[in-house]
Amino acid sequence: MTDPIRPTDDEARRLARDLLDAATFAALGVIDPETGAPFLSRVALACDAEGTPVSLISSLSAHATALRANPEASLLVGEPEDRGDPLTHPRLTVQARAVSIARDDPAFAALRDHYLALRPKSKLYIDFGDFYFIRFEVQRGFLNGGFGKAFRLTPGDLTR
């Protein structure tokens, strides 16, 4: 059988980076600590100044509980357009380790300002005491650029 994964090239790196940079939300996959089963949630997403995916989440959420128990996570970004087969549109899966940035962390204030500049509507809840940031440290990625366009990506492939 022929390996369907293509060698990663600059075009694949650019497409993956574009998908991350354009994403305003993602499907977040975690492991439910009660059942051990996969659990998906939709989260707001942005990239920090270095291009690392980040999300502002509530400590009250099920995915926050799951990430405290096991910081391994997956993000799926890329949405199909209004027309055509959804499987022909590019999407990117990122496997990452979630790192919490608590309100008392020195990095929080700068990340807060950066995030608000990108996601101004988060001003409604960003200062609630239960909200904090998660930085998703990329372990690897999988880009499906459409039929016949599959790539494995390293953390370096996804840097700016």
Image (cartoon, rainbow, N blue to C red):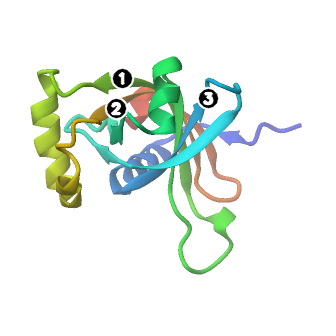
Residue 4 - label: none
Residue 96 lies, in percent from the top left, at 48, 28
**Which residue is denoted by mark 1 in the rendering?**
99
Q: Is residue 110 left or right of residue 91?
A: left
Q: Is residue 58 left or right of residue 115?
A: right
**Which residue is denoted by mark 3 in the rendering?**
31
The amino acid type, in three-letter code, at marker 1 is Val
In the rendered image, the quadrant that contains the N terminus is: top right
In the rendered image, the quadrant that contains the C terminus is: top left
Residue 30 lies, in percent from the top left, at 57, 33
For label 1, the crowd category at 10 Å Cα-Cα, with few meaning under 14, some 14 to 19 and many 20 or more, is some
* Outermost residue to the right: 1
**Can you say whether 75 is above or below 100 in the image?**
below
**Which residue is denoted by mark 2 in the rendering?**
134
Query: Pointer 2 and pointer 1: residues touching (CB < 8 Å)?
Result: yes
Q: Is residue 95 left or right of residue 45?
A: right
Ranked by sequence position, the earlier of labels 3 and 2 is 3
**Can you say whether 41 is above or below 132 in the image?**
below
The amino acid type, in three-letter code, at marker 3 is Ile
Ranked by sequence position, the earlier of labels 1 and 3 is 3
Residue placed at 43% from the left, 33% from the top? 157
The amino acid type, in three-letter code, at marker 2 is Ile
Residue placed at 22% from the left, 36% from the top? 129
Kindly state the secondary structure of the residue where label 1 is placed: strand
Query: Pointer 3 and pointer 2: residues touching (CB < 8 Å)?
Result: no
Kindly state the secondary structure of the residue where label 3 is placed: strand
